[in-house]
Image (cartoon, rainbow, N blue to C red):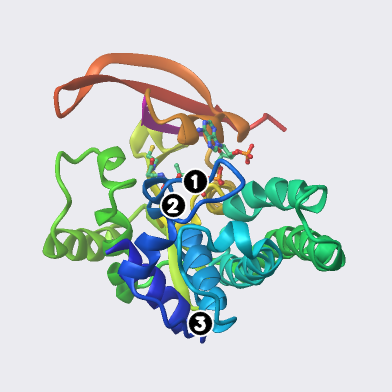
């Protein structure tokens, strides 16, 4: 599955690699001069599998036999294949905007530049790759803020929202014990859009909806209060500032409505969300102990609030 996904990622971005799963497994049996990552560790990260596939394809293209001493006997050429594989990995990481991966690998590329085993002839290329990775990191940040826009939600947005709400890293925090069904997500989305006093914004990257936030205005004596009743970001866009952008745009809506107070609730184990809300001026105002049951775990619910500074 992981292998097939990595192959799809490569081919969908125009890289063709003539490598089978069996060859990849054998590649991990080849002796190296370094303590290398295990196949298990690599299989957990699609871009690392991409690297290994690209490296093996390059080794095969060079006409080297795959045997247990291939690397030790052909150090210089395999290092070259390794650098070529990193070029492919970096190109894909940039395309999928995987900042965290680039950041993590940047440190390793820096180490390769001073590796005594790096052949002299490959040093300039390795330094150049390091510079490219640094550049990619900056570009991704930049691309991201340039590329992302926030707009009012539309009826047809329920489809991308369905994918967001059904993903493993989102649905447990949305207050549901199981993945919501398509009908439920669609009906509730349409219902909320039609509800007076409810405002929904979506974040769009390219032409894809990658996150949303919803605010519900209070009534009667609480008409100056807004409840942030939902915020979620597609897993591959999380921790890249999308949630922050959505919340900031919603603050503008709240301002236009003349709201004085915003409130929300959050599971006490949702560190990323709590960090985000605190960085935006929310404070923990209360704790409902063991208010949420997730599987066998009981989790506290935090009530957080933010007051608009008085003029
Ligand atoms: C919570 C959520 C909406 C935040 O959106 P996001 O786009 O991931 O958030 P951002 O990137 O804007 O901000 C995340 C912040 O948490 C920080 N962070 C990342 N990992 C963290 C961790 N393990 N612990 C604490 N903070 C962390 C980030 O550095 C960032 O802070 P910074 O801007 O100061 O650097 C999103 O992660 C999500 O959809 N989660 C699943 C659904 C959910 O939990 N919804 C909220 C229900 S209350």
- From the viewer's side, name the closer residue of 304 and 244: 244
The reply to whether the magenta stretch includes residue 263 is yes
Query: Do the numbered discs 2 and 1 sit on residues whose CB atoms are within 8 Å?
Result: yes
Horizontal and vertical percent position of residue 133: 73, 61
Q: What numbered label is drawn on residue 13? A: 3
Main secondary structure of the magenta stretch: strand
In this figure, which residue is indicated by the disc labeled 2?
A: 42
Real-space CA distance between mark 3 and mark 2, rounded to the nearest whole angstrom: 20 Å
Q: Quadrant of the N terminus?
A: bottom left
- From the viewer's side, name the closer residue of 205 and 7: 7
Is the CB of mark 1 within 8 Å of ligand 1?
A: no
Which region shows up in magenta?
A: 260-267
Q: Residue at x 53, y 64 (%)?
A: 51
168 relative to 53 in the view: left or right: left
Horizontal and vertical percent position of residue 95: 58, 72
Q: What numbered label is drawn on residue 37? A: 1
Q: Is residue 288 visible?
A: yes
Q: Nearer the viewer, mark 3 or mark 1?
A: 1
């Amino acid at each position: 599955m992981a292998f097939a996904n990595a192959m799809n990622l490569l081919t969908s971005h125009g890289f063709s690699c003539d490598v089978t799963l069996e060859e990849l497994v054998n590649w991990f049996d080849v002796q190296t001069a370094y303590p290398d990552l295990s196949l298990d560790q690599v299989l957990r990260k699609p871009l690392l599998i991409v690297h290994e596939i690209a490296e093996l394809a390059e080794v095969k293209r060079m006409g080297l036999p795959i045997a247990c001493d291939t690397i030790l006997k052909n150090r210089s050429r395999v290092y070259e294949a390794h650098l070529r594989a990193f070029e492919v990995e970096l190109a894909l990481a940039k395309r999928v905007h995987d900042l965290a991966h680039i950041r993590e690998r940047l440190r390793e590329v820096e180490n390769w530049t001073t590796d005594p085993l790096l052949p002299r002839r490959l040093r300039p290329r390795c330094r150049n790759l390091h510079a490219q990775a640094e550049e990619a990191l900056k570009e991704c940040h930049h691309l991201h803020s340039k590329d992302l826009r926030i707009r009012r939600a539309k009826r047809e947005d329920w489809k991308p929202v369905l994918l967001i709400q059904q993903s493993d890293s989102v649905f447990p925090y949305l207050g549901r014990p199981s993945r919501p069904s398509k009908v439920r997500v669609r009906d509730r989305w349409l219902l909320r859009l039609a509800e007076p006093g409810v405002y929904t914004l979506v974040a769009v990257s390219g032409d894809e909806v990658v996150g949303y936030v919803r605010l519900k205005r209070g009534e009667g004596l609480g008409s100056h209060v807004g409840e942030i009743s939902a915020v979620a970001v597609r897993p591959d866009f999380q921790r890249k500032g999308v949630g922050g952008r959505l919340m900031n745009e919603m603050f503008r809506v709240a301002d236009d409505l003349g709201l004085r107070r915003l409130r929300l609730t959050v599971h006490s184990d949702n560190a990323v969300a709590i960090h985000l809300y605190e960085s935006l001026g929310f404070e923990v105002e209360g704790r409902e102990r063991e208010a949420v049951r997730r599987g066998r775990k009981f989790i506290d619910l935090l009530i957080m609030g933010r007051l608009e500074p008085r003029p």
